[in-house]
Amino acid sequence: MGDYSESRIKINGCEISLKRGGSGESMLYLHGAAGAGSWMPFMEILAGSFDLIVPEHPGFGASETPDWLDNIHDLAYFYLDFLKELDLRDVHLAGGSLGGWTALELAARCTFRLKSLTVCSPGGIYVKGLPLEDAFLWNAEESIRNLFHNQEIADRLLERSQTEEEKNVAMKNHFTTAKLTWSPRNHDPHLYKWLHRIDVPTHIIWGKQDKLLPVEYAEEYRKLIPDSRVTLFDECGHLPHTEKTADYCKAIVDAIGEFTA
């Protein structure tokens, strides 16, 4: 892995862990439910094109759990404060799954500091006739297998033994995810009404074989968000950044290049 730094920063009374690497225009990447405890291969690739900033959400991993964190709206407002505190401007905001949903909530509120938006397999809306899976009903093995189309990846993860520290972090992340997404499951019943406010170029990415959030939701988001485009990956589940790492990063970089040309 290339060079990146790790630090801690306090925003609104909450101290969080922060990873940062690369150079160029700023990209703020918001992680999914599994957290951001390590500098992953897709981060390394994106850091080749951007000043990549990857915080761990309040309530996740090495970050503190503040008393004020009750719902996904709190997380969105936290990152608006984060952007202001770091005085980040013309930011390429990106996020996957829970992080993508948070990015949508943030952008629907204010795009003043944003230059583009990229979301991958985000929760956030519910469409009648397109049921959402309830991952909280999956057992431990299903929770891993159902995230991937390529079961060889799932096999490798299931064969690996977790340390006690990793188990504790996973439990913390799971608890906070449940707190943010439990009721209603994986969506904000009001978000769809305000997605039209997103006024920066938006890229929606999805795996065609996503078992958690149906790929049909990608088109529903495209209809709701002006100036948005969709990229779909075949033979790919809920985590394109892991399953289609190179293609995922190329799609992000290429779209932003077109957006800003």
Image (spheres, rainbow, N blue to C red):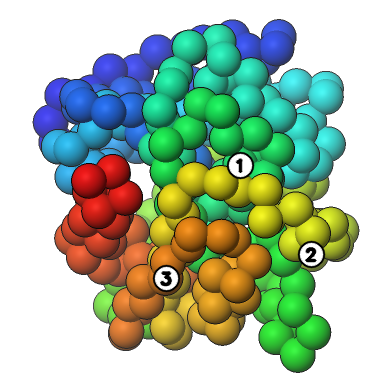
**Left or right for 213, reference 19:** right
Query: Residue 199 appears at what percent x and percent y?
Result: 56, 46
Judged from the image, the secondary structure of the residue bearing numbered disc 1 is helix
Which label's residue is closer to the chain start, 3 or 1?
Answer: 1
Question: Local crowd at mark 1 within 10 Å, few (<14), some, or many (≥20)?
Answer: many
Which residue lies at the image location 43% right of the left edge and 21% below the top edge? Answer: 89
Query: Residue 66 appears at what percent x and percent y?
Result: 75, 21
Three-letter residue code for mark 3: Val
Q: Inspect this view and state whether residue 93 appears.
A: yes
Distance in Å between CA atoms under marks 2 and 3: 24 Å
Query: Residue 219 appears at what percent x and percent y?
Result: 54, 78
Distance in Å between CA atoms under marks 3 and 1: 17 Å
**What residue occupies the far bottom of the structure in this picture?**
129
Judged from the image, the secondary structure of the residue bearing numbered disc 3 is strand
Which residue lies at the image location 44% right of the left edge and 18% below the top edge? Answer: 88
Residue at the disc numbered 1: 107
Q: Is residue 3 above or below residue 155?
A: above
Residue 230 numbered mark, or none: 3
